């Protein structure tokens, strides 16, 4: 603070006290004197420890922990202990304060949470280059899940504030942090039921990874805001009148637009423009009911709504009877509103709405003092057990673990039933074999088939939500290495590998006994020297592999004459050739000179990534490969999120040179629409004549019901040039769709 003088110091001090008072206000009036003093002491320690330190944005560093604490208390509803930990979450790493100092002043509980929050920067110095340091840090973070959930909750608050202030960092850091957020932090927030945090993280990440798409959707939402609000009023007014006639205590009926990220995801997945995303908003009805009447009252609301508006029978989602594993409860219905528009309606109690926005933190606050085990408790306990089982799997590298965690533990779920009516939550894409292992590992190992909805199916059958599955087993174990290509869940993969290892060990033991008997019957000494000679003769790398092959029948001992092999003189070993020198020298990566600036180095070899085919004008980044220079990817490449989040240290900035020579680049287009007379001729005329673009290939086929679809590969100068071509082709017919293909 010595650097801050006069008016600047007063302005800083005023803002600091203002934010601190806001935090105390968010903690509420019921906070005890002891807890209040603890928060005050934590603020004092943080302010003194970070004194004189500033963030990249130029603001004093102390504002960051204050904002993290405000998010934890004001937005997640956490208590004073969490506020203390949020205020101190960076002091052990960034200042001279030690964990012992924390424990002495604030106690063991606070010290344990701070220990979990302390960032790891040098502890993984010996990590293999093929593994990501970020992945190791994620693993460390995930290990705290079973200890104290507040570690993860405060970590998410920290990440959310970093995302809110991401504009002040460099381009490379923006992309890395935004991609990490989309890859694991937002799904983790979703899994913990923190809908508001998850939604904001996704929108902010999209703002930095795909700024053009973000601005496009934001602008169109703003343009249609007045019309949207008018329609929502038109939809809600009749409902209000009907609900007021009932004995229900309706707290709020509101309409709110979907998040920008969810709209973008729908546009991409369905390959449609913004104008064709019809459910850009949802209606939410919130009632205040006693806990024992919540479900019944929600169904009453549903009945009143469907009396007024016709419901879509296939779009009812009942998360009252079976809450999601993140604690989410609600009824979702889709009804036909005014002007024949389908509208999604979400029906929740006040408690359900709080849990939906603030997740398990809110759930536990409602549960304080109650010993009742709720469906949310069971669902979260089951999920936490799966997390622990995944984390304890020693077979997985850090990268594999993070990937496993993201796919199997953070992804969307389906509900599968046993014939007795028990339900199992499974990741989307799970097979019948995954379900067998979810019931019990021994059932999985002995599985030979399954009945899905009373129909006999193979074990690789992909399950759907609501399927009733009966597993068929046999007495003899059936697991084999091919099963690893069938299963989707980490539990099944772990149990299969465990079984294969034990089976290999068992066979190796049997094989060793067979070899020993062979030595005895032929009067030879069974020792390491003689076994080494046999391994060289058979060109087998290890004794364990040799014994396994003997037991499996791959090596026929009856054909092996031990005396001849053991008495054969040793031949001089050929000079060892290193693995790298035995290969032909790798050709240098193709370099497109003068078009791309990579960091500050114009000479670095690079090539275009085939997974996304960047064009001049596309936002891009470089990824350092092993032996092939840099690969240039689009920032919205299908692989970008994974590369940036798992291999952030290999990401380098890249940009198109403004004086690019406009050489032709290859780009692929997908076209589809109504098969009108002369449509192909019109398309080719636009490409070749109107736009003077060279075609590399064209393949368009007529489909059933008067439709056509196909692909066109063209040579184009830039992303803007390609967009112009797409616009021209789409103008040929009212019902034609054209989109750029990544590969």
Image (tube, rainbow, N blue to C red):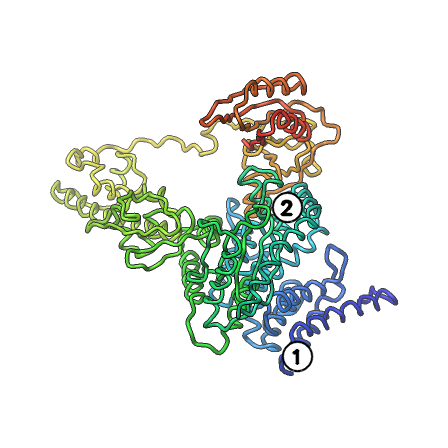
Q: Quadrant of the N terminus?
A: bottom right
Residue at the image position 64 percent from the left and 55 percent from the top:
233
Q: Residue furthest left?
A: 521
Residue 26: x and y, percent?
A: 66, 72
**In the drawing, what numbered circle is on residue 175?**
2
Which residue matches tag 1? 29
**In the drawing, what numbered circle is on residue 722?**
none
**How packed is label 1: few (under 14 Cα within 10 Å), some, or many (20 or more)?**
few
Q: In this image, 205 relative to 710: left or right?
A: right
Q: Residue furthest bottom?
A: 33
Residue closer to the observer: 651 or 188: 188
Q: Earlier in the sequence, mark 2 or mark 1?
A: 1
Residue closer to the observer: 435 or 84: 435
Q: In this image, 542 relative to 99: left or right?
A: left
Q: Quadrant of the C terminus?
A: top right
User: 146 above or below 721?
Assistant: below
Q: In this image, 523 relative to 38: left or right?
A: left
> Of helix, strand and loop, which one carries label 2?
helix
Residue 583: x and y, percent?
A: 46, 29
> Of helix, strand and loop, which one carries label 1?
loop
Residue 417: x and y, percent?
A: 34, 55
Residue 59: x and y, percent?
A: 76, 60
């Amino acid at each position: 603070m010595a650097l801050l003088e006069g008016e600047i110091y007063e302005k800083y001090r005023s803002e600091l006290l203002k934010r601190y008072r806001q935090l105390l206000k968010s903690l509420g009036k019921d906070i005890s004197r002891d807890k209040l003093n603890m928060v005050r002491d934590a603020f004092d320690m943080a302010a003194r420890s970070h004194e004189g330190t500033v963030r990249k944005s130029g603001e004093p560093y102390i504002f960051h922990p204050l904002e993290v604490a405000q998010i934890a208390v004001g937005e997640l509803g956490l208590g004073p202990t969490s506020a203390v930990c949020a205020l101190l979450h960076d002091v052990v790493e960034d200042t001279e304060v030690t964990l012992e100092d924390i424990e002495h002043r604030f106690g063991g509980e606070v010290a344990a949470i701070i220990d979990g929050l302390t960032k790891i920067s040098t502890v993984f110095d010996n990590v293999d280059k093929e593994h990501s340091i970020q992945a190791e840090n994620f693993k460390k973070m995930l290990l705290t899940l079973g200890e104290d959930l507040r570690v993860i909750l405060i970590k998410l608050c920290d990440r959310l504030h970093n995302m809110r202030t991401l504009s002040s960092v460099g381009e490379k850091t923006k992309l890395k942090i935004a991609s990490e957020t989309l890859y694991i932090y937002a799904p983790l927030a979703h899994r913990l039921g923190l809908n508001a945090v998850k939604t904001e993280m996704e929108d902010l990440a999209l703002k930095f990874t795909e700024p053009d798409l973000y601005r496009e959707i934001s602008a169109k939402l703003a343009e249609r805001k007045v019309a949207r609000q008018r329609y929502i009023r038109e939809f809600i007014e009749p409902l209000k009148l009907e609900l007021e006639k009932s004995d229900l205590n309706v707290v709020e009926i509101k309409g709110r637009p979907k998040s920008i990220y969810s709209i973008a995801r729908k546009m991409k997945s369905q390959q449609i423009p913004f104008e064709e995303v019809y459910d850009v908003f949802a209606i939410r009805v919130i009632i205040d009911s006693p806990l024992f009447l919540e479900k019944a009252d929600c169904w009453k609301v549903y009945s009143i709504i469907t009396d007024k508006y016709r419901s879509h029978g296939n779009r009812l989602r009942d998360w009252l009877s079976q809450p999601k594993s993140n604690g989410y409860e609600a009824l979702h219905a889709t009804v036909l509103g005014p002007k024949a528009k389908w509208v999604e309606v979400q029906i929740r109690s006040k408690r359900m709405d709080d849990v939906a926005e603030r997740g398990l933190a809110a759930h536990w606050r409602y549960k304080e003092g109650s010993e009742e085990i709720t469906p949310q408790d069971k669902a979260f306990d089951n999920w936490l057990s799966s997390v622990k089982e995944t984390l304890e799997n020693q077979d997985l590298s850090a990268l594999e673990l993070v990937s496993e965690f993201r796919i199997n533990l953070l992804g969307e779920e389906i509900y599968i039933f046993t014939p007795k009516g028990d339900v199992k939550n499974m990741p989307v894409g799970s097979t019948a074999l995954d379900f067998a292992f979810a019931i019990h590992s021994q059932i999985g190992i002995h599985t030979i088939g399954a009945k899905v909805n009373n129909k006999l199916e193979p074990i690789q059958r992909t399950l759907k939500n609501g399927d009733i599955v009966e597993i068929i087993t046999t007495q003899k174990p059936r697991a084999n290495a091919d099963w690893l290509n069938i299963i989707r869940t980490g539990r099944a993969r772990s149990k299969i590998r465990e079984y294969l290892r034990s089976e290999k060990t068992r066979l190796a033991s049997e094989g060793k006994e067979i070899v020993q008997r062979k030595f005895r019957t032929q009067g030879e000494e069974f020792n390491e020297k003689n076994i080494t000679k046999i391994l060289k003769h058979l060109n087998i790398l290890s004794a364990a592999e040799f014994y396994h092959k003997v037991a499996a029948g791959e090596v026929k001992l009856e054909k092996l004459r031990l005396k001849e092999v053991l008495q054969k003189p040793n031949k001089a070993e050929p000079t060892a050739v290193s693995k790298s020198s035995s290969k032909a020298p790798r050709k240098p990566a193709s370099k497109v000179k003068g078009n791309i600036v990579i960091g500050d180095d114009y000479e670095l070899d690079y090539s275009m990534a085939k997974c996304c085919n960047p064009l001049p004008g596309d936002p891009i980044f470089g990824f350092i490969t092993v032996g092939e220079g840099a690969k240039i990817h689009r920032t919205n490449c299908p692989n970008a999120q994974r590369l940036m989040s798992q291999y952030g240290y290999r990401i380098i900035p890249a940009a198109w040179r403004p004086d690019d020579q406009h050489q032709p680049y290859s780009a692929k287009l997908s076209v589809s629409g109504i098969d009108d007379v002369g449509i192909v001729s019109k398309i080719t005329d636009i490409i070749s004549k109107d736009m003077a673009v060279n075609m590399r290939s064209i393949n368009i086929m007529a489909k059933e019901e008067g439709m056509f679809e196909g692909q066109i590969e063209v040579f184009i100068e830039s992303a803007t040039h390609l967009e112009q071509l797409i616009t021209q082709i789409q103008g040929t017919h009212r019902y034609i769709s054209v989109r750029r293909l990544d590969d």
